[in-house]
Image (spheres, helix red, strand yellow):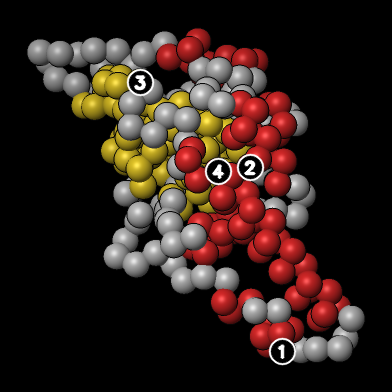
């Protein structure tokens, strides 16, 4: 899917046109994380790994939160996938539960057909082979063959959530690849796009200097101000 086709639920022209056009084959989540550091903001989601799919996935967050059920209130795991717009990234807060799955091949098949960009789960998924076969992108903490039915229920949809200590608000931009996941607040997109371009250009100059054979890496970095990219946010996630 062309990243320029990914919709934004609030302002598609301003937001998608700025961040998404700044991404190309050389930009990775590592560069995006560096740009966030340079702006003294966090947003990296740690502890989840890519299970299926390939390449950089970018899209507005569609958020879900699950909670454990009880005998008094069994609830359901929800049929939310019919409400997810094409291009969105589903972000699920299942509180890191690795003893039941909240995503399987049926949901993958429907999501893929609808053009959903991918799924991020603070918890477990199953039916990994089926998702891999059609190239659908999933990041999760674990896999588990046990269904979430009767174990957890959908408690909230399209509300702010927290996964691995990182806040995610519906419409924030989720950027994910093989190296990890970065959540970009919607209001930061334009500023971040400028910083991504600057860092991508700087790293290109460093690499060009090294390849030309004129400078060792340490001198190429120093000459181009690489070590002044920006310090990470202090005092935890911002």
- Name the residue beneath numbered marker 1: 219
Tell me how far mark 3 sits from mark 1, CA to CA.
Answer: 51 Å
Assess whether mark 4 and mark 2 are in contact (beta carbons under 8 angstroms): yes
Q: Of marks 1 and 2, which one's residue comes earlier in the chain? A: 2
**Looking at the picture, how far across and down is residue 72, in whole percent?**
10, 13
Is 165 rendered above or below residue 20?
Answer: below
* Residue 146 falls in image quadrant: top left
Q: How many marks?
A: 4
Q: Quadrant of the N terminus?
A: top right
Left or right: 61 in relation to 16: left
- Name the residue beneath numbered marker 4: 189
Tell me how far mark 2 sits from mark 3, CA to CA.
Answer: 25 Å
Identify the secondary structure beneath mark 3: strand
Assess whether mark 1 and mark 3 are in contact (beta carbons under 8 angstroms): no
Residue at 56%, 62% (x, y): give it. Answer: 34
Is 83 rendered above or below residue 157?
Answer: above
- Name the residue beneath numbered marker 3: 157
* Residue 100 falls in image quadrant: top left
**Looking at the picture, how far across and down is residue 149, in whole percent?**
32, 17
Is 43 rendered above or below residue 206?
Answer: above
Residue at 46%, 71% (x, y): give it. Answer: 231
Tell me how far mark 1 sits from mark 4, CA to CA.
Answer: 32 Å
**Looking at the picture, how far across and down is residue 85, in whole percent?**
55, 17
Q: Of marks 1 and 4, which one's residue comes earlier in the chain? A: 4
Tell me how far mark 1 sits from mark 2, CA to CA.
Answer: 31 Å
How packed mark 2 is, by other alpha carbons closer than 10 Å (few <14, some 14-19, many 20 or more), is many
Identify the secondary structure beneath mark 2: helix
Q: Of marks 3 and 1, which one's residue comes earlier in the chain? A: 3
Front residue (pair 66, 28)? 28
């Amino acid at each position: 899917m062309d990243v320029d086709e990914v919709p934004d639920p609030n302002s598609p022209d301003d937001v998608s046109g700025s961040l998404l056009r700044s991404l190309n084959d050389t930009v990775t989540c590592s560069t995006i994380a560096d740009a966030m550091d340079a702006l003294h903001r966090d947003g990296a989601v740690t502890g989840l790994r890519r299970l299926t799919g390939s390449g950089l996935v970018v899209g507005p967050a569609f958020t879900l939160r699950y909670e454990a059920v009880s005998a008094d209130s069994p609830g359901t795991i929800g049929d939310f996938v019919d409400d997810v717009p094409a291009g969105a990234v589903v972000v699920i807060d299942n509180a890191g539960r690795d003893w039941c799955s909240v995503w399987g091949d049926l949901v993958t098949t429907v999501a893929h057909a609808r053009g959903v960009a991918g799924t991020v789960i603070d918890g477990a998924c199953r039916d990994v082979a089926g998702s891999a076969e059609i190239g659908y992108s999933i990041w999760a903490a674990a896999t588990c063959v046990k269904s979430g039915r009767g174990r957890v229920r959908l408690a909230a949809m399209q509300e702010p959530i927290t996964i691995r200590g990182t806040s995610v608000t519906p419409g924030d931009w989720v950027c994910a690849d093989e190296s990890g996941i970065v959540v970009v607040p919607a209001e930061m997109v334009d500023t971040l796009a400028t910083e991504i371009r600057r860092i991508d250009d700087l790293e290109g100059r460093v690499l060009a200097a090294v390849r030309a054979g004129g400078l060792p890496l340490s001198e190429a970095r120093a000459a181009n101000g690489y070590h002044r990219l920006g310090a990470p946010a202090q005092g935890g996630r911002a």
